[in-house]
Amino acid sequence: MGSSTENSAYGPTGNPWDLTRVPGGSGGGSAAALASYQAPLAIGTDTGGSIRQPAAVTGTVGVKPTYGAVSRYGMVAFSSSLDQGGPCARTVLDAALLHEVIAGHDPMDSTSIDQPVPSVVEAARNGDVKGLRVGVVKEFGGEGYQAGVVQRFNESVELLRELGAEVTEISCPSFDLALAAYYLIAPSECSSNLARFDAMRYGLRVGDDGTRSAEDVTALTREAGFGPEVKRRVMLGTYALSSGYYDAYYGSAQKVRTLISRDFEKAFEQVDVVISPTSPTTAFPIGERADDPLAMYLADLCTIPSNLAGNAAMSLPCGLAPEDGLPVGLQIIAPAMADDRLYRVGAAVEAAFTARWGHPLLEEAPSL
């Protein structure tokens, strides 16, 4: 868990662009494998941005499909109302091809949507934004955003205008509350889901020498098996769900979630897609935010609303930040079950960038 992949059981993952920096998280391993050409495709799981934020800071493409569009059967549950598996790749078309393979109804997943998969591959092969209404969220900007990220995002907005899109600014006031709501809902569901790891039924078992009680073995196993960030979230969630606090914390966060969904509904009455930076900054150094969980959580500022609402979102490269030469991500958000719009816009932007400056990953990524 977390926005840096520093909490992996295998230790921190390096960002192929600069091995002293994080590759994002928690899907940083998938993104790093792509950016370093160890794999052509990868799969990630996105709970609050864990596919898109790593894609942004490694110069790759990451997609969070509509909630329920890709089966979660076989995934370890973190936050069941937020988790979504999705494709990771180096190009928009590759992501679409993988998306088409893994999406579709699965009777083994009770949240799986029984509808046809949108024509994502066709959209990726015929990217065109002429006449498309694009919304820029006013709340995704301001203090805390790196200058180079803002510069590349503004250039992307102008590029979309040049390609024929109709760009307008929109307001989603509840988005300012998304981070706080997420960090009540996700830890609460995490606390509930991870309770199954009790050393009795399956998985790791530590300290079972025949002399300890079941409670002691459970405690020793969880101490050994859960890392610091997981423990932090379990404790936060258990507190938020405890007697006397449920309505004040978890219940209130769910009300905010409803407001965020309504903001999206209003936005999509005005525009076809919404765009924003994927992450407020480029990749930060390993260890820089390890002792400051709140600073770490801010990395997901732009990605969390889509998980709370359940709609579709993509991150793709939009150049390098001038101050550090590291990748910047452009986020595209579409309504639920309109995943093909992500690929339509993404393919158009990717083709335009490639024609003008060369693909930011393929042309400038370092070799390891």
Image: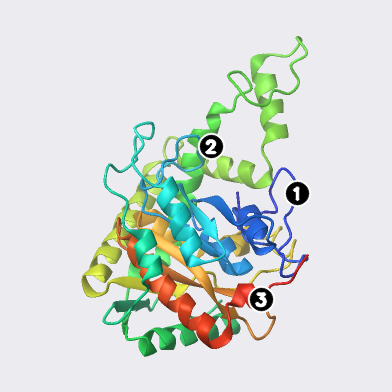
Among the two numbered marks 2 and 3 on one chain, the one whose residue lies closer to the N terminus: 2
Mark 2 residue type: Val
Residues at marks 3 and 1 touching, judged by CB atoms closer than 8 Å? no
Q: Which residue is nearer to you in this view: 209 or 160?
A: 160
User: In the displayed structure, does residue 237 sit left or right of residue 218?
Assistant: left
**Residue in the picture at 60% in, 24% down:** 198
Give the alpha-carbon distance from disc 2 to disc 3, as whole Å.
Answer: 32 Å
Q: Which residue is nearer to you in this view: 50 or 238?
A: 50
Q: Name the residue under label 1.
A: 11
Q: Please say if 238 is above or below 345.
A: above
Q: Mark 3 points at which residue?
A: 326
Q: Where is residue 31 in the image (x, y as percent from the top left)?
A: 62, 59
Residues at marks 2 and 3 touching, judged by CB atoms closer than 8 Å? no
Among the two numbered marks 2 and 1 on one chain, the one whose residue lies closer to the N terminus: 1
Mark 1 residue type: Gly
Q: Position of residue 274 (x, y in %)?
A: 35, 72
**Residue in the picture at 66% in, 76% down:** 326
Which label is found at residue 76? Answer: 2
Q: Where is residue 150 in the image (x, y as percent from the top left)?
A: 52, 83
Among the two numbered marks 3 and 1 on one chain, the one whose residue lies closer to the N terminus: 1
